[in-house]
């Protein structure tokens, strides 16, 4: 318990959840897909399809890039998945 208190793990997790709440407002398909990914109910392949990676005209916006980086940072998106989101 003492290690948990001093590790800051709970604080980091709370900050991550607050940051995600500010970024993922659910108003777009992309927001909804990342929200479901963060909840552990969507896999990477389905996320990439929902976001439109690989479709003609797809380009990662700054918003999509931030969501993908947050997902990568939290271990919800692999490095290969991150690169797909960033490069289409």
Image (tube, rainbow, N blue to C red):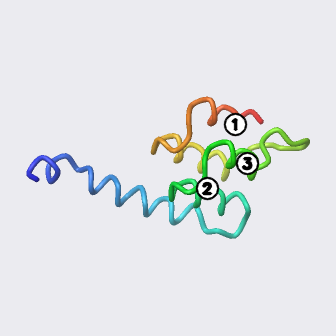
Q: Residue 67: horizontal and vertical position, in percent?
A: 59, 50
Q: Is residue 39 above or below residue 7?
A: below
Q: Earlier in the sequence, mark 1 or mark 2?
A: 2
The secondary structure type at the circle numbered 3 is loop
Q: Residue 75: horizontal and vertical position, in percent?
A: 47, 41
Neighbour tally class for label 3: few under 14, some 14-19, many 20 plus, Cα within 10 Å: few
Q: Count how many numbered circles sit on residues in the image.
A: 3
Q: Earlier in the sequence, mark 2 or mark 3?
A: 2
Q: Quadrant of residue 54?
A: top right
The secondary structure type at the circle numbered 2 is helix
Distance from Cα at disc 2 to Cα at disc 3 = 14 Å
Q: Which residue is mark 2?
A: 34
Q: Which residue is mark 1?
A: 86
The quarter of the picture where the C terminus appears is: top right
Q: Earlier in the sequence, mark 3 or mark 1?
A: 3
- The residue positioned 74% from the left and 44% from the top of the image is 60
Q: Which mark is residue 61?
A: 3
Q: Residue 46: horizontal and vertical position, in percent?
A: 69, 48
**Circles 1 and 2 in contact, beta carbons < 8 Å:** no
Q: Nearer the viewer, residue 43 or 8?
A: 43
Q: Residue 86: horizontal and vertical position, in percent?
A: 69, 37
- Left or right? Give the position of 85 relative to 14: right
The secondary structure type at the circle numbered 1 is helix
**Circles 2 and 3 in contact, beta carbons < 8 Å:** no
- The residue positioned 73% from the left and 62% from the top of the image is 29
- Left or right? Give the position of 60 relative to 67: right
Neighbour tally class for label 2: few under 14, some 14-19, many 20 plus, Cα within 10 Å: many
């Amino acid at each position: 318990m003492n290690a948990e208190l001093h590790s800051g793990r709970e604080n980091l997790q709370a900050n991550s959840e607050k940051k995600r709440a500010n970024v993922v407002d659910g108003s777009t398909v992309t927001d909804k897909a990342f929200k479901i990914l963060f909840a552990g109910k969507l896999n990477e392949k389905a996320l990439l399809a929902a976001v439109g990676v690989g479709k003609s005209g797809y380009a990662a916006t700054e918003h999509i890039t931030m969501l993908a980086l947050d997902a990568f940072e939290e271990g919800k998106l692999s490095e290969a998945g991150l690169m797909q989101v960033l490069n289409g």
